């Protein structure tokens, strides 16, 4: 059995500074690598990760191979127990379901995030970004993550769902507090934070749902509420789906905006090219997702004994898909450690694959296109003020904590 070396430490500062050295070591190992701390077999090569992501026999839910009693025992072992609201609305979700339940819930949401419907949000996003930059360009020196990147996605996804803009800041905090418990550190302190945030999140959504029952309007929350009142969804499914949409619309988009801006400032030729040739923007955005995948890790379970990356693994095995490692695989990408905004083809796996392919990718890319295009149009130069910005620690996140920059108006 090949096990991860002690140097593989996703909670360390060294890993946050540069996870790609560790990913390279994993890719050099034959077959999957066992990571004892998480009781998981890690896949790091592109072909292995892409194949696993598309494999319908790899699922998110333990119900395919464990009884309800065994699932509860496993939750106790992993410290996922005694979290009543987190269990109701987070541990069960569209993201963590499979089969008929997953397909039914996904159909309810999918039609809201088609390219055509997402494109209708362009005017609203552009107006918000313009107003935000009016203020930030007067300030000049900003933290790109806090002052710009974190402001836009929450406002946009909140507007699409139908959450008043006054809650945008709180929704971001709740999202971060809920999601942090999915990483390697499962301490009781982090557990309490996740449960409290989930409960407060639920209380707000309960009020908003009740309002939609009394006062229907044209937004996604109302359409989902109507599916609930007509019996097409349970209350738990409704709340869980709304939470997932809001959380997914925050963290990963903020992270890839931050890392994308950082990459452009590290590669001034790319930044200059993007200024001079705006038509390159779509491929540049795809390269941002490949270069620093904002969700670098995703797990699934085997529903049957199976040979994965050349190794026979039993039913119930937890498998980790390292999207961040796969997207830097030299067997798939030429010069993978180079940021190339004209890279084509660029078949990265940052959006996952198969049944769990990211529904919000069109909206995230539209947010990024408008933010970067407008920023480059309205500035003469952008300067990075920190030589080495600190990145978040963890296996399942990738993005700068802060990104101090100076904006010089055009």
Image: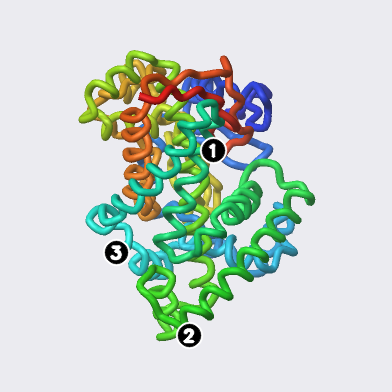
Find numbered disc 2 in the image and state the secondary structure of the residue it sits on. Answer: helix
Which is nearer the eye, 407 or 113?
407
Q: Which residue is mark 3?
A: 111
Marks 1 and 2 sit apart, C-alpha to C-alpha, by: 36 Å
Residue sitting farthest toward the front: 138
Which is nearer the eye, 213 or 5?
213
Find numbered disc 1 in the image and state the secondary structure of the residue it sits on. Answer: helix
Mark 3 vs 1: CB contact within 8 A: no
* Discs 1/2, front: 1
Location of residue 11 in the rendering, given as x and y in whole percent from the top left corner:
67, 32
Location of residue 13 in the rendering, given as x and y in whole percent from the top left corner:
67, 25
* Discs 3/2, front: 2
- Residue drawn at point x = 43 percent, y = 64 percent: 161
Q: Which mark identifies residue 386?
A: none
Mark 3 vs 2: CB contact within 8 A: no
Left or right of 185, for residue 226: left
Find numbered disc 3 in the image and state the secondary structure of the residue it sits on. Answer: helix
| Label 1 vs 2, first from the N-terminus | 1
| Label 3 vs 2, first from the N-terminus | 3
Location of residue 220 in the rendering, given as x and y in whole percent from the top left corner:
39, 68
Q: Is residue 120 above or below residue 410?
A: below
Which is nearer the eye, 175 or 48?
175
Mark 1 vs 2: CB contact within 8 A: no
Which is nearer the eye, 167 or 346?
167
Other-residue count near label 3 (Cα within 10 Å), few / some / many at <14 / 14–19 / ≥20: few
Q: Which residue is mark 2?
A: 214
Q: Quadrant of residue 367?
A: top left
Q: Which residue is mark 1?
A: 147
Whether residue 44 is visible to the viewer of this picture, yes or no, is no
| Label 3 vs 1, first from the N-terminus | 3
Check the picture and name the quadrant holding the C terminus.
top left
């Amino acid at each position: 059995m090949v096990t991860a070396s002690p140097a593989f430490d996703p909670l360390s500062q060294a890993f946050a500074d540069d996870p790609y050295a560790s990913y390279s070591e994993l890719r050099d190992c034959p077959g999957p690598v066992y990571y004892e701390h998480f009781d998981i077999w890690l896949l790091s090569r592109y072909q292995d990760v892409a194949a696993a992501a598309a494999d319908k026999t790899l699922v998110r839910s333990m119900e395919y191979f464990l009884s309800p009693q065994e699932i509860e025992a496993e939750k106790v072992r992993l410290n996922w127990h005694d979290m009543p609201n987190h269990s109701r609305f987070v541990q069960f979700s569209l993201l963590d379901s499979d089969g008929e339940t997953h397909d039914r819930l996904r159909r309810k949401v999918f039609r809201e995030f088609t390219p055509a419907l997402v494109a209708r949000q362009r005017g609203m996003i552009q107006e918000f970004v313009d107003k935000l930059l009016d203020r930030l360009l007067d300030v000049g020196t900003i933290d790109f993550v806090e002052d710009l990147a974190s402001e836009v996605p929450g406002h946009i996804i909140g507007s699409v769902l139908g959450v008043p803009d006054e809650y945008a800041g709180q929704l971001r905090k709740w999202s971060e507090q809920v999601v942090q418990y999915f990483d390697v550190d499962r301490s009781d302190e982090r557990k309490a934070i996740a449960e409290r945030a989930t409960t407060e999140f639920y209380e707000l959504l309960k009020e908003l749902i009740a309002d939609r029952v009394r006062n229907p309007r044209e937004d996604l929350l109302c359409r989902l509420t109507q599916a609930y009142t007509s019996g097409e969804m349970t209350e738990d499914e409704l709340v869980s789906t709304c939470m997932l949409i809001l959380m997914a619309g925050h963290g990963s988009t903020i992270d890839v905006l931050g890392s994308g801006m950082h990459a452009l400032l590290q590669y001034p030729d790319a930044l200059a090219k993007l200024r001079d040739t705006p038509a390159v923007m779509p491929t540049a955005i795809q390269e941002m997702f490949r270069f620093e995948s904002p969700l670098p890790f995703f797990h699934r379970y085997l529903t049957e004994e199976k040979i994965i990356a050349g190794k026979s693994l039993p039913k119930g095995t937890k498998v980790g898909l390292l999207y961040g490692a796969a997207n830097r695989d030299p067997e798939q990408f030429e010069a993978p450690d180079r940021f190339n905004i004209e890279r084509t083809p660029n078949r990265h796996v940052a959006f996952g694959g198969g049944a769990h392919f990211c529904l919000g990718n069109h909206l995230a890319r539209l947010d990024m296109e408008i933010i970067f295009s407008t920023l480059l149009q309205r500035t003469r130069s952008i300067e990075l003020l920190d030589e080495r910005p600190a990145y978040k620690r963890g296996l399942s996140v990738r993005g700068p904590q802060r990104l101090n920059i100076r904006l010089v108006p055009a």
